[in-house]
């Protein structure tokens, strides 16, 4: 084996090492995203449960109709100025670092803490660090 083969092997070894590092980083990112998706799906399931319970209570006790509900949803949808099936809401303050969190974000961009107080669902949902 000559010097060129040794240099070639050393260079290839470095490239392989960098590729392995990138694979490890990508794997960690995928794992993080999987956890975030699972958390979001859990919160969505909880939101659906709370919404259904609230609707049934209102319909039973107040005699509200689905049409009245649809009208109110459309009115609230327009509160942020855009009829898009979403409510952007207002900015909040991070309970972790005290910095503002834009309404479009679900986590603080500074410390990564999940934003709470997104609405009624958070008010009645158990916190992740407490017993239900």
Image (cartoon, grey):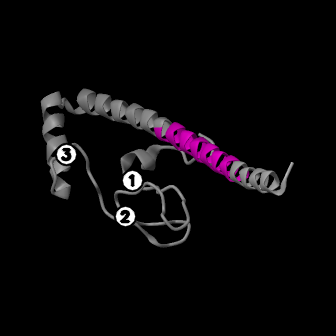
Residue at the (53%, 37%) spot, across then down: 38
64 shown above or below 29: above
- Residue identified by numbered label 2: 102
Using the rendered image of the protein, determine whether residue 94 is visible from the camera's viewpoint: yes
Residue 93 spot, x, y in % from top left: 44, 68
Residue 95 spot, x, y in % from top left: 52, 65
Along the polypeptide, which appears first: circle 2 or circle 3? 3
Along the polypeptide, which appears first: circle 1 or circle 2? 2
Please, what secondary structure does the residue beneath circle 2 have? loop
Residue 77: mark = none
- Residue identified by numbered label 1: 118
- Does the stretch in magenta take in 39? yes
Camera-nearest label, 1 or 3: 3
Residue at the (31%, 62%) spot, across then down: 90
108 shown above or below 19: below
Residue 21 spot, x, y in % from top left: 69, 51
Q: Residues within 10 Å of mark 1 (few under 14, many from 20)?
A: some
Where are the magenta residues, as a range? 17-40
Quick check: 117 left or right of 68?
Answer: right
Please, what secondary structure does the residue beneath circle 1 have? loop
Separation of marks 1 and 2 at Cα, in angstroms: 11 Å
Residue 84: mark = 3
Separation of marks 2 and 3 at Cα, in angstroms: 18 Å
Q: Residues within 10 Å of mark 3 (few under 14, many from 20)?
A: few
Residue 117 spot, x, y in % from top left: 42, 56
Separation of marks 1 and 3 at Cα, in angstroms: 18 Å
Secondary structure mainly formed by the magenta segment = helix
Along the polypeptide, which appears first: circle 1 or circle 3? 3
Quick check: 96 left or right of 106?
Answer: right
Residue at the (19%, 29%) spot, across then down: 63
Residue at the (47%, 72%) spot, across then down: 99
- Does the stretch in magenta take in 91? no
């Amino acid at each position: 084996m000559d010097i060129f083969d040794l240099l070639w092997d050393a260079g290839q070894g470095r490239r392989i090492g960098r590729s392995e590092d990138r694979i490890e980083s990508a794997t960690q990112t995928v794992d993080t995203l999987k956890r975030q998706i699972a958390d979001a799906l859990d919160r969505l399931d909880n939101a659906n449960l709370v919404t259904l319970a609230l609707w049934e209570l209102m319909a039973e006790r107040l005699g509200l109709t689905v049409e009245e509900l649809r009208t109110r949803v459309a009115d609230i949808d327009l509160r942020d100025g855009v009829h898009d099936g979403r409510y952007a809401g207002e900015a909040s303050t991070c309970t972790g670092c005290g910095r503002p969190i834009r309404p479009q974000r679900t986590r603080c961009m500074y410390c990564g803490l999940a934003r709470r107080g997104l609405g009624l669902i958070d008010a009645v949902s158990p916190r992740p660090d407490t017993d239900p």
